[in-house]
Amino acid sequence: MNASRRIMPFPLRTLSSPLRCGAAALISAVALGAASQALAQEDPIKVGILHSLSGTMAISESTLKDTVEMLIAQQNEQGGLLGRQLEAVVVDPASNWPLFAERARELLEQHQVDVVFGNWTSVSRKAVLPVFEELNGLLFYPVQYEGEESSENVFYTGAAPNQQAIPAVDYLINEMGIERFALLGTDYVYPRTTNRILEAYLKEEHGVADDDIMINYTPFGHSDWQNIVAEVRRFGSEGKPTAVVSTINGDANVPFYRELGNQGVDAGDIPVIAFSVGEQELTGVDTAPLVGHLAAWNYFMSVDTDANYDFIDAWIEWTGDEEAVTNDPMEAHYIGFNMWAEAVRKAGTTDPDAIKDAIIGVVVPNLSGSYAAMMPNHHITKPVLIGEIQDNGQFDIVWQTPSTVAGDAWSDYLPGSRDLMADWQAPMRCGNFNVATGRCGGSTAAEEAEAALAE
Amino acid sequence: MRYPPMLGPATAGARAGTDAAEDERTSHSRGSWLLALALSLALVLGLSITTPAAAQDSTPDDDAAAMTLLEALDVDSFPTKGEAIDAIVHSDDSRARDWLQALLDGRLQRAGDGRFVVVLDNTGRDWPVQDALSGEPLGQMSRRELDRIGINNALRNQLRSAIAVVDLYAADVGLRRASAERLLGEVDSDLAGPLAEVIEEEPDARVRERLVQALAIYRLEQGELQAIDDLRGSLHPRVRVALARAASGTVESRAANGDDPIVADAAREALNSIEQMLKLNRAAETLYFGLSLGSVLVLAAIGLAITFGVMGVINMAHGELIMLGAYTTWAMQQLLPGQPGLALILAIPAGFLVAALAGIAIERGVIQFLKGRPLETLLATFGISLILQQLVRTGISPLNRTVITPEWMSGSIAVNDALSLTLNRMYVLGFALVVFAVLMLIMRRTRLGLEVRAVTQNRAMARSMGIRATRVDIMTFALGSGVAGLAGVALSQLTNVGPNLGQNYIIDSFMVVVFGGVGNLWGTLVAGLSLGVINQVLEPWAGAVMAKIIVLVFIILFIQKRPRGLFPQKGRAAEG
């Protein structure tokens, strides 16, 4: 900035005429470049927000949009980044997976955003992957997911299976003595992959028999749970301590928990541990009959730290709603946003390639009193917390990992992914390096997007 | 350790002999001595009510000692907390049961100044509290100042068992029933002796029967053959677990322990007869599930049976009219806080009115201009449905709203130990039948019904007979829409109240109406109920996703064969 200002008052008049012409042309070109650079630096930094504000996913995603807007406002109050203000660019992909790709392209090409925070479902993430890789954008993805992916352009601030599902069943087995598992899930890629990993893990590591694992899938928004809950009740009344591991998504949870309560399935008899039920999902439920059922997350609103209370107060003030709740993906955005801001400060620019190098190894505090570090595989370190549902719709933390757990992009329990690893540092720079063959698989974003959208 | 008289140290000897059996039921050996301790508390509390002499003996509560007891709870480790709970159970403090209950409810908390308080209401950010020792109200305290004494499921079970043993001596028969229910499968050697005495003195037959079973499970675990007679015919899952354990693969281990193989045989035989009865129960349960799902389908579809079936208007916004009914329920509950039941009842007429008015607006605003152009009507009403959804999303919230289920609608009625019917679904089933009956009456017995039938059969003729066809159109559409609103009120008790509520039911509604036969209310009823039952029968073995697909394929094939549905209209009306 200073450099550009110094060029401007160059003493042109002291030069002779022909020389002056050439020099003027040269200098004006330099000055123009410098001026446009100076202008650009006064321009705000653009932060894209790619969350559905209408359609089925609006229930979960619209609060994330508000979260990022709040974080941007807070950052601006502190003077922005690199002396520039931040500006949110909000688009609405309307819960429509192919539209996610179009909106992502719009953000990167038309609005020229420097970074994007967005997506919830795995299929929408798969849909935007090729766009981000082609246009070299940056995406921060805040939701727990099934793993088996590591893209150069995506930062996964939600939990990988080893940061949520695996510690959760360890807790069931070691602390609660559970021997039978009913794996219930919504019928799409996240529950199916997670349950495949869990099934392999339970059989290989804990010697659980085939008969002691029940797997059941239901459609999105399933509302008639009578039969399935009755089946679980029978499954659990055959002598062995039983638990339900639920990857049921979003809306369908409310009627599911209601049916559990009505059929009298008590957490003392058959506890349910959920991976997709947070404070927000419970706002639609009377939680009195559900006390003691569990959830595994990396953050709960009930976390007892000052950082968390400050965050909650800021959120309540931002939304103007006394009853507003915070949840795990919101914390993931909080971490992701701060990591990105730190990387921008470190790199001194918002250039994607510079950020990609700068952000690995960045450490920022999370809301639960520990620190999150960005790992070379673009996943972060997180503590794993197990919470029990309380009658006020909050979770009481009953167990947590002694230290943070680093996210593992490729599961150790699936045959195809056992040998793969991701490392986006030089010299490897690969998202799916095969340790056995010593080869990098390269990007398969386009095929994966096609496969995901075809489903 | 101070044992109550009937739990003298002699029982310790009896216990040592049963160690082998104890090992086999690890899940139930939640500290047998805890129950003994709980029992001592029971005696302190229970007997202090029944015998005044005991009350005079008890020393006044010592606040310093109480503080030490509570302070022991304020640790991180759950096992240590478990020991602290034992200590409280064991103390003579008369406030012990209140503390245990508060701890169980998560309301026992520690304030910043070290005092222990009981939270009276934990909604919002500031909570009213009272002192745990003196019981004095301390006003409001913020979440930040309070540290909750957390418990986990293991401690919760421990607390429940302790409280159950105390409640065994309670004067209230309801408490005793709950306690007996809880003790099933939880009896151990220390409790067995006193339990036998309690059974003899117990006046209530139901409590007695449960306690006999609870004791019999313990006796069976000790290898007593006669115990099986007490358990035979019981459908309770815990009884089945106990019998299965006695009968199952542990026969060799039992033989190794010198146990009787005859017991295993008898248990197996008892188990078999129980399984037979369970099969019948399961069939009844599936039928109930099917009827209840069917009643939801009927409710959702019956409004459409009028607007689409009778009037022939393809109304894609039908689902959103259901949604409006559900939101009306929510709004009524917001207007009448603390009275969810009354609000729900008032929501029935209110939901009808709101949806009916919305229906009139749609009919006057859009549909009347598109008469006889089904494709345009379809597109226009689809647009209206999207508008209504987004209006709710931006106007109220994209998040689901909490609709509280009133006390009298939650839980279930136990027909027997294995079969219980959920109450909310039973109410919805009844409500669906009532709505259907009223609609039938309106269509068959009232002037409006007559006019509706006349207009739909032959519009021109009806008009020339002096019927104001436009007015009838409005009334009919309002009626169909209002019924959709009623469906929304009922659905708010079963599913999410959110902007997407209607979308989930629109396809099912059309399916039911077409399957039942367009223009026939009976067809809708039969189609809805039978689709519900078919779905629930298929679900256990095909899975929820496959069951839905199979039902759809079935309907497609059925419509191929009988294009006019189950109950086709006959005569001139069919040609209209």
Image: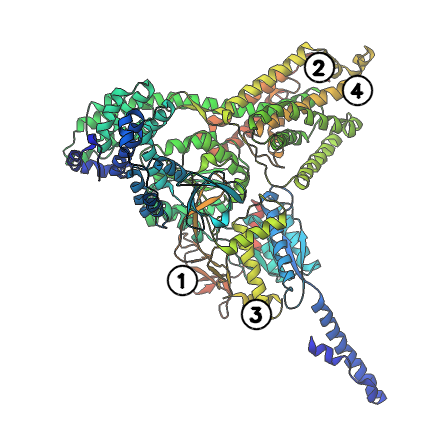
Q: Which residue is mark 3?
A: A346
What amino acid is labelled 3 in the image?
Lys
| Residue A122 versus residue B53 in the image, above or below | below
Frontmost of labels 4 and 2 is 4
Q: Nearer the viewer, residue A281 or B171?
A: B171
User: Hey, what amino acid is under mark 1?
Assistant: Ala
Looking at the image, residue A435 sits to the left or right of residue A156; the answer is: left
Disc number placed over residue B368 in the picture, else none: none
Q: Which mark is residue B470?
A: 4
Marks 2 and 3, how far apart at CA? 78 Å
Mark found first going from the N terminus, 3 or 1: 3
Which class describes the residues within 10 Å of circle 1: few (<14), some (14-19), or many (20+)? Answer: few
Disc 2 secondary structure class = helix
Gap between marks 4 and 1 measured at Cα: 78 Å
Label 3 to label 1: alpha-carbon separation: 36 Å
Q: Chain of mark 2?
A: B
Disc 1 chain ID: A
Instruction: Determine the residue positioned at 69% across, 27% down.
Output: B354
Q: Identity of the amino acid at label 2?
A: Ala
Task: Label 1, secondary structure: give it.
Answer: loop
3D distance between C-alphas at marks 1 and 2: 74 Å
Residue A70 at x, y = what percent?
Answer: 62, 54
Q: Which residue is mark 1?
A: A436
Task: Give the mark toward the camera: 3 or 1.
Answer: 3
Point out the image quarter for the C terminus of chain B. top right
Provide the residue designation for mark 2: B573
Kindly identify which chain the residue marked by label 4 belongs to: B
Which residue corresponds to the image point at 20% horizontal and 22% vertical from the top-left?
Answer: B226
Residue A153 visible in the current orientation:
no
Q: Are marks 4 and 1 on the same chain?
A: no
> What is the x, y in percent for residue B274?
31, 23
